[in-house]
Each structure stands twice: as structure tokens, then as C-alpha cells.
């Protein structure tokens, strides 16, 4: 494959992208009613810092097993230690940052599938104010809570079942998903973690990430980003450290590295050409930049992905 498939996005509101995962990552998402992936594989493709976006007509359940997770659901912001989960109904803007070593599960489910699985159940699960219809962020204590422990076990089972090609696979996935959604509704009653920031700070953080997406190949300075947002460089850095646990400059570097890894994994372009595509005028500088952030050369990284 000579060209990387671009992330499929559609602007909404203030240019919040609608990410079509099927077109961006795995065509199977487009056809599947239920899709499972482990967090590590998705993070290798999309990065650990996922800027604000939404999914039209899809529910998504992220279960993070370890590390610190910073989640932004619409205009609400949380910092939670794993294990935890967050649920995003269709069209709800969300963003999140996970630790580099974080592991977990990601379920992407067509909204019609969720409606069908829950439609015949108790009205409390399907009312207009039901937990399943609102974004959720819930800390889990599987050692103390049997429901949390069961949900994590069910996620392991759905991951195993997803990789099978046996008869009745679809029915098995539906049955497991229905139990998981029931547990999500039960666990939602525990309440969500305390919010940890102001809405204005979340807006600034989202705006910064949006600008990074537009300009990371131009290698703008932090002062130029801050000027476009209308804040000082110091305030921008403080907000990024608080909401993402990372300095503002690191977020820019991570986006460049994310694109570099994609190009190395999914294209056959020479490393020199990739450096120019990413806005580097000197391929030697790109080589040093990549090695410093990845701990290996670009060629070594590409070879490691081929061997996997």
C-alpha cells in the first residue's frame, strides 16, 4: 500500500470531527454490529492522546485497566485511576489521554444494536434519563464489587469470542454484550468521579488539540498556538499539564510521532520522503527526532512492525 488512509472525519459544530473508525482503522467496523479491540492496538494507531471527536450512530465503551486516565466528556472533565470505564453515546464529543503502558478494552457498537438489546428490558434501562443514554465515567473496584469483577470477566470473554469464526459467534457476542450493558447500567448508579476543571479550560484544551491537528506539519511555535487561542503560553501549558498530564509541547511532538508511526506502518514511502511529508526540511533532523522519541530508528521501527 503506497498511501496511508487518512482519518475519516466530518466537521460538527465548532469543527469537532466525526471519526468513522471503519474508514480510518479497520473496514470491519463499518459492517460489524459489535466490534472489539484491545486498547493497545487502537493506541498504536490513533495515539494515547485522543483529541476531541465523536462517533455518529455508534456507542463506544472504553475500559482502562491501569494507569491514570484523563477523560473529557462533552464539557465535563475527569482524572481517574484505572480500572475504570467511560461510555460515550452517539454524537457525544469526547477526548481522553491514557498512560503509555495502559491496557484495556474498547467496544464499538452500532446504536441500533444497543437499542435492540435493551429495548425489551425494564423501562428503567431505557427511559430518556437512563444511564445508557448519557456519557459516563466510572471508577471500578473489582476486588470489592462483584458487578465490576463480572464486567471485566465478560470483556475478556467477548475479546476471545470476537477472534473466533465458529457458528453462533454473532449470538454469543450479542449475549455477552447484553450482560455488559446491564452491568454498565448497574455500575453507573455508583456515581461519577468528581470533575476536576472548568469548562473554559476544557474548551481551550480542545481548541489547542484542534489547532495541532490542523498545523502540526507546519511546526508552529507554542507562542503562535497560544496567540491563535487568545491565551498566554504559560496558561496553555498549565492547562495541558492539568488536563492531559503532559506539557503543551509534548502534545505537539506526540501528534507528529503518531503520524510518523502510521506512515512507517502503512506505507512503503522511504524515510526521507516521510520526513518531508511531516514538514521536516532536514531528513537528518527527523531521524534524530524519531530516535529520541521512539528509542529506535525509523527503519528499525518499520521492521519491527513487519515482524509482528
Image (spheres, grey):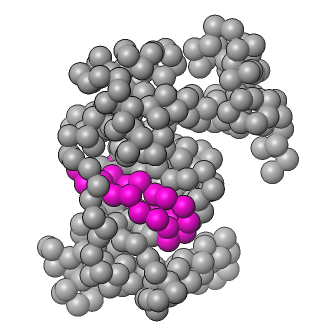
| Number of residue marks | 0
In the image, residue 68 above or below residue 20: below
Quarter of the image that includes the N terminus: top right
Residue 17 placement (x, y as % from top left): 34, 39
Q: Residue at x 23, y 90 (%)?
A: 122
Residue 256 location, quadrant = top right
Left or right for 24, reference 71:
right
Q: Residue at x 36, y 36 (%)?
A: 238
In the image, residue 19 above or below residue 262: below
In the image, residue 209 above or below residue 219: below
Q: Residue furthest top?
A: 281
Q: Which residue is nearer to you in this view: 218 or 162?
A: 218
* Magenta stretch: includes residue 68: yes
Residue 138 placement (x, y as % from top left): 36, 71
Does any portion of residue 155 appear in the rendered image? Answer: yes
Residue 200 location, quadrant = top left
Residue 127 location, quadrant = bottom left
Q: Which residue is nearer to you in this view: 228 or 303?
A: 228
Q: Dominant secondary structure of the magenta stretch? A: strand
Q: Which residue is nearer to you in this view: 97 or 1?
A: 97
Left or right for 27, reference 135:
right
In the image, residue 57 above or below residue 305: below
Q: Residue at x 27, y 64 (%)?
A: 194
Does any portion of residue 34 appear in the rendered image? Answer: no
Residue 228 placement (x, y as % from top left): 29, 18
Region in magenta: 54-83
Amino acid at each position: 500500500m503506497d498511501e496511508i488512509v487518512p482519518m475519516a472525519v466530518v466537521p460538527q459544530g465548532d469543527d469537532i470531527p466525526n471519526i468513522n473508525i471503519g474508514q480510518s482503522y479497520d473496514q470491519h467496523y463499518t459492517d460489524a454490529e459489535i466490534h472489539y479491540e484491545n486498547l493497545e492496538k487502537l493506541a498504536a494507531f490513533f495515539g494515547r492522546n485522543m483529541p476531541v471527536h465523536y462517533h455518529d450512530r455508534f456507542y463506544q465503551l472504553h475500559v482502562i485497566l491501569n494507569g491514570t486516565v484523563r477523560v473529557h466528556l462533552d464539557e465535563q472533565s475527569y482524572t481517574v485511576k484505572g480500572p475504570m470505564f467511560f461510555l460515550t453515546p452517539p454524537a457525544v464529543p469526547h477526548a481522553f489521554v491514557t498512560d503509555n503502558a495502559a491496557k484495556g478494552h474498547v467496544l464499538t457498537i452500532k446504536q441500533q444494536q444497543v437499542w435492540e438489546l435493551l429495548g425489551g428490558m425494564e423501562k428503567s434501562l431505557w427511559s430518556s434519563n437512563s444511564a445508557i443514554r448519557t456519557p459516563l465515567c466510572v471508577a471500578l473496584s473489582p476486588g470489592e464489587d462483584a458487578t465490576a469483577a463480572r464486567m471485566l470477566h465478560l470483556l475478556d470473554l467477548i475479546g476471545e469470542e470476537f477472534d473466533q469464526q465458529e457458528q453462533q459467534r454473532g449470538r454469543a457476542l450479542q449475549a455477552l454484550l447484553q450482560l455488559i450493558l446491564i452491568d454498565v447500567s448497574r455500575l453507573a448508579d455508583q456515581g461519577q468521579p468528581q470533575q476536576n476543571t472548568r469548562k473554559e479550560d476544557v474548551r481551550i484544551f480542545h481548541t489547542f488539540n484542534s489547532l495541532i491537528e490542523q498545523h502540526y506539519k507546519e511546526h508552529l511555535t507554542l507562542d503562535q498556538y497560544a496567540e491563535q487561542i487568545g491565551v498566554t503560553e504559560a496558561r496553555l501549558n498549565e492547562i495541558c499539564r492539568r488536563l492531559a498530564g503532559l506539557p503543551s509541547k509534548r502534545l505537539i511532538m506526540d501528534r507528529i510521532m503518531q503520524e510518523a508511526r502510521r506512515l512507517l506502518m502503512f506505507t512503503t514511502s522511504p524515510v526521507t520522503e516521510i520526513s518531508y511529508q511531516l514538514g521536516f526540511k532536514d531528513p537528518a533532523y527527523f531521524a534524530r527526532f524519531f530516535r529520541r522519541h521512539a528509542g529506535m530508528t525509523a527503519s528499525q521501527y518499520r521492521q519491527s512492525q513487519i515482524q509482528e
